[in-house]
Image (cartoon, coloured by chain):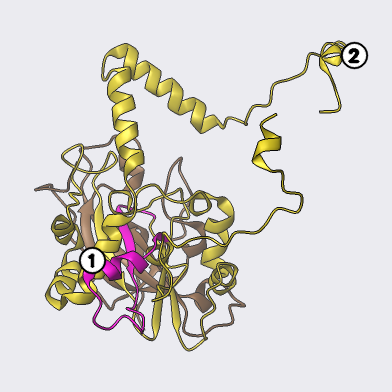
Chain colours: A brown, B yellow
Amino acid sequence: MPPAERKSLPARFEPGDRVRVKELPNLYYSRTQMYVRGVIGTVAVCTYTDLKPEDEAWSRDDAPYEQYYIIRFRQKDLWAEYPFDKDTLQTELPDSWLEPVTA
Amino acid sequence: MAHDHDHEHDHDGGHPAAPMVAEVTDFEILEIAVRELAIEKGLFTVDEHRKFTEWAESIGPASGSRLVAKAWTDPAFKARVLADATKASLEVGIDWSQPTGFGTPSDYTEFRVLEDTPTLHHVIVCTLCSCYPRPMLGHSPYWYRSPNYRRRIVRWPRQVLAEFGLILPPEIEIRVEDSNQKCRFMVLPLRPAGTEGWTEQQLAEIVTRDCMIGVALPRADRKADDVRPVHAALRPVPHEEAGR
């Protein structure tokens, strides 16, 4: 279903914000890759609002929509011994998988 | 070849010769089961399924090549592509809402085009499964769906690109785009030198599928339909002898 005029939770982040991916257990289904859990990245793009995968997988169509973001990570933050300073990786995550990073 | 027909039933141990079959995965069995249930239930017919499969498998990367060539020659179109690629796709004849009316293949998708610059190179992957901009590029190559590529391109992108023959200096940022949700991505590579004054049609011919995945760069001297090098056989058999 296209994200039309659905009730959506407010977006908590905007491009440039620093965020950390939450360390949560997998309950049956998730699209949040293990390799980004607990890692700090930067919001690159606000994309669309939609159900989060955990709700969609169980057809919880009445659950609220959430803002999705493309998050940019430094490869050196994802992999401890990564040797190239400039390289980055982007992936997409819904609002509830992110927590703000201050300072 | 060394055996003749007399030996055909002459196997030991009583085991009949097993036919060669490819291994079928659990997911393929699941797909067949769901498909057959849907046909029994009357959601679609066998013929409709075949027609859809033929249509889906007939899509190739030509639309993507045209999109890139048009973006190289028309700055206003490039701006529209970068602002809203889903909408700009209509200008090269691709409607992302088709065939279901709300998305392809079965769900809402948002198409985004990643623009390379002299200091930034993109490469796409889906670490979770096989997400790929299918309306624009057709079916993904088999290696794109392999765990080998999916695991390693995020962890060792420069080494994997080197295996494809693409070696980039460390000054160029490599950005891996993992399409794990509903965005689908395609790379808009840099227009190569030596293509000044080319038409859109000429340019489209050098934008191969791999250039839009990000594992190759377009070159003025390489087209998708170039003649492959032919290596002579070590022991050639003339056709008139082979026919006997």
- Is residue A94 visible to us here? no
For label 1, the residue is A46
The answer to whether residue B73 is above or below residue A27 is: below
Residue closest to the eye, B171 or B204: B204
The answer to whether residue B123 is above or below residue B12 is: below
Residue closest to the eye, B182 or B142: B142
Residue B4 occupies quadrant: top right
Q: Residues within 10 Å of mark 1 (few under 14, many from 20)?
A: some
Residue B182 at x, y percent in the picture: 30, 52
Q: Is residue B147 left or right of residue B180?
A: right
Q: Chain of mark 2?
A: B
Give the amino acid type for the residue marked by disc 1 in the picture.
Cys
Residue B43 at x, y percent in the picture: 26, 19
For label 2, the residue is B13
Q: Is residue B184 magenta?
A: yes
Residue that appears at 13% across and 59% down:
B91
Give the amino acid type for the residue marked by disc 2 in the picture.
Gly
Residue B192 at x, y percent in the picture: 36, 80
Residue A87 at x, y percent in the picture: 47, 79
Q: Is residue B104 left or right of residue B220?
A: left
Q: Chain of mark 1?
A: A
Q: Which residues are magenta?
A: B180-209
| Image marks 2 and 1: residues in contact by CB distance under 8 Å | no
